[in-house]
Image (spheres, rainbow, N blue to C red):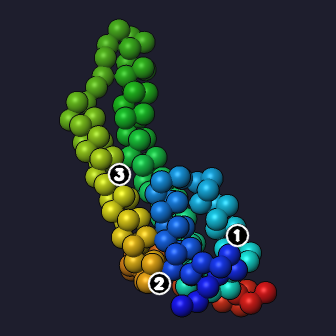
Amino acid sequence: MQKTKLGISVGLLGAIMCFSTLFSGYFISLILLGYILLFESNEWLRKNSVKAVILLISFSAASTLIGLIPDAISLIDSVVSLVGGSFGILFVSRLVSLCNNVLSVLKTLVFLVLGFKAFNQGTIKIGFVDRMLDKHFSNSNVNQ
């Protein structure tokens, strides 16, 4: 079992990284990612850590995009209220709420599975993230 410079297994640090993205959000995850990219040389650990942060950003972006829909409806309602009317689409509000709930459950499941698979240095394939990692992740900096 390969060890990190901290003295713990690579799999455990990978699991900590995945679980930190789920439970603590950006601050701790980015600090951990910075440490891993600067000081650890295990390619799986580095890629898995970057993957976790990319997924965290992706889930945040999706949530933000979904949140634009009620914001747009609110903007239209504000404009219409200037002339004494009102505008609202209850169905859209319910659909946005459903999408946010599905996204939240999906995020939790993805990070839990990634975290538990990390204990054995495993991962799950996530198309767009894996393609991005293959395209942009450089193996030449691993031993520097």
Residue 82 found in image quarter: top left
Q: x and y percent of residue 66 in the render?
A: 38, 46
Mark 1 or 3, which is nearer the eye? 1
Marks 1 and 2, how far apart at CA: 18 Å
Q: In the current view of this chain or complex, which residue is farthest to the right?
A: 144
Q: Which mark is residue 104?
A: 3
Residue at 25 percent across and 45 percent down: it is 98
Which quadrant does the N terminus fall into? bottom right
Residue 38 location (% of width, % of height): 74, 75
Q: In this view, does 139 lie to the left or right of 1?
A: right
Q: How crowded is mark 1: few (under 14 residues within 10 Å), some or many (20 or more)?
A: few
Front residue of 72 and 125: 125
Residue type, numbered disc 3: Ser
The residue wearing badge 1 is: 35
Residue at 68% over, 85% down: 41
Task: From the image, tell me which residue sits under label 2.
Answer: 121
Left or right of 89 on screen, residue 67: right
Disc 3 packing (10 Å; few <14; some 14–19; many ≥20): some
Residue 13, above or below 88: below
Residue at image location 32% in from the left, 13% down from the top: 85
